[in-house]
Amino acid sequence: MSSSVNRSIVDRRTFFRGAGLTAAAIFGTGLLGACSSAVDEQRAGAATGASGTPVRGGTLKTGITADVIPATFLTNTSGATTVIGLAYDTLVRYPHDNVEPQPRLAKSWQLAADGLSLTLELRDDVTFHSGRPFTSKDAEFSLRTYADPKWTAQLRSTAAAITAFDTSDPHRLVLTLAHPLGNVFDLLDTVPILDSESIDKLATGDAFIGTGPFKLVSRTPNSALVFERNEHYWIPDRPFLDRVEVSVIPDSQALLSSLKSGQVAVAGGLNYRDTETLGETAGFQAVSLEGAELQVYVGANVTHPALADVRVRQAIAYAIDRDRVISEVFRGSGYPVNLPWPKSSPAYDESRNTTFTRDATKARAILAGSGIAVPTLPLTYQAGNPFYEATAQIVQANLAEIGIPVELDPQEGATFIKALIGGTIPALWVTFHSWAQYVPSTLTVSAYPFNALKNSSHYESPAYVDAAGAAWRVADGTGAEAKDRYRAVSDQLLDGLFLVEIGVVLNQLATAQRVQGIDWTKRSEIVYTDTYLA
């Protein structure tokens, strides 16, 4: 596989549709005082924003519902994705609608016919925010750091399958692979290029030095981050904005009020009903992050005595009202599934997604046949997130209907993430997962909930390990051979049922009309390189 830069790599598509908002909450411009003038400014922007002519300068005030947690910087949490989107670049980037890599810091590449080596030609005009030139040794350092278990990165098994690096040419990187990796470009799309000279400060949250369009100038933990334009960015005349200010605002209703009053101009993390309304309101627009789909699911710790029997998990799968969750919680912005794959995935199979449809009578019969008296089970989720809370309430009601008592167990975000990664959630949980929008093998060798070798559910199955490994060791991750192996993976997921999928949902943002040119990656990292204030 090879590619070269034959077209502009900054001509990114932006989708504006009347829908809802994102789970990786981001909101933006306006002053915290003077609400009436801010509203007037937004309405004025609605009249001029359709011109399509980029405007240079200005400050975009944005917000996130949770601060970056330095120790989990490489784990795809919402605070980290905000910082990565602003301050970092990757070697390649996938477009929204497929997994064909496009040039970023790597301008071209060649994958060997046997799939055991990959040669990347790197840009020679890139510098870090510190002024230090980017070279092949920085790419090696970033990939090695990502593979280090201390960072708990989800694709680290793929990074660890790189057995050798040739950096003899500062602008060429040659990777030697332990075996063919169908998801090697997933890794290169994911790993931010890190600065080796400041990695210790990144670990403490004191510095985030990358090669991206904006550079960090200040951070107040759990409160704010301020970024300024990178004057030496490698894309000519980008970014347009002078400054991006990020505020940490955990309460989604406060965020909604700020957007409606004009104090901010981009908001995520709102409930989908509010987003739907905003998308139909003059002066606002809704953005659907196509290609960055999320999946909402119920996880089960199979070491819990009541959940160790797959029949109890089957009863749960039949009990859940997926249609209600999608229609009420996500306002129809998604579709119910039994398997993690979105419709764009080479592993998607419509017929498999009706294996477990809501049938309370069947669920009660399966539960009775198990002979297990299920005690009250805690259902854990991240507190303050309207999606998780509403979904958990529906699941609680569904399980009560079949005789499984559930106690809601909201946990602070950092506590929940630590428990998910560590596999210490005691019984059931509700959250999102991602990675299914990538090459399918990435999910089952990488994501904490799905990792066949070690997962959050403590589910162990040699057959699942074999199926996941076979799907991973295919050079072409979208070819016919790979698709056959993905079917075997899907069989194992339905048989083991340690995770009960509810549905695929589209990540959403709502913005003031004057905010134009927003882009994103498949990990929902909001990219402001081409953003401007109309």
Image: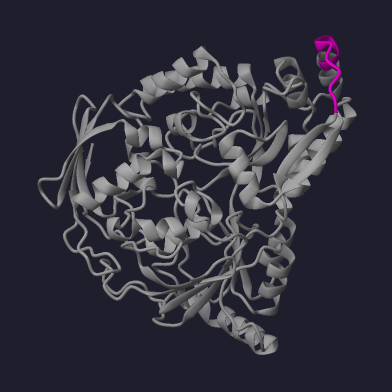
Report the span colored magenta: 367-375
Place residue 25 in its image quadrant: bottom right
Q: Position of residue 33 (x, y in %)?
A: 66, 86
Q: Quadrant of the N terminus?
A: top left
Locate residue 228 relative to residue 409 in the image: left or right: left
Residue lying at 89% horizontally and 29% vertically, measured from the top left: 401
Residue 103 visible at all: yes
Q: How many marks?
A: 0
Residue nearer the viewer, 282 or 131: 131
- Residue 468, percent across and down? 45, 22
**34 lies left or right of 228:** right
Visible residue check, residue 100: no
For the point 33% across and 60% down, the residue is: 198
Residue found at the far left of this picture: 168
Residue 234 at what x, y percent from top left? 25, 66
Task: Using the image as rendered, state which of residue 127 and residue 118 is in the foreground.
Answer: 127
Q: Quadrant of residue 270?
A: bottom right
Residue 286's spot in the image, x, y percent?
Answer: 61, 63
Residue at 82% over, 20% down: 363
Q: Residue at x 59, y 22 (%)?
A: 459
Q: Is residue 97 above or below residue 113?
A: below
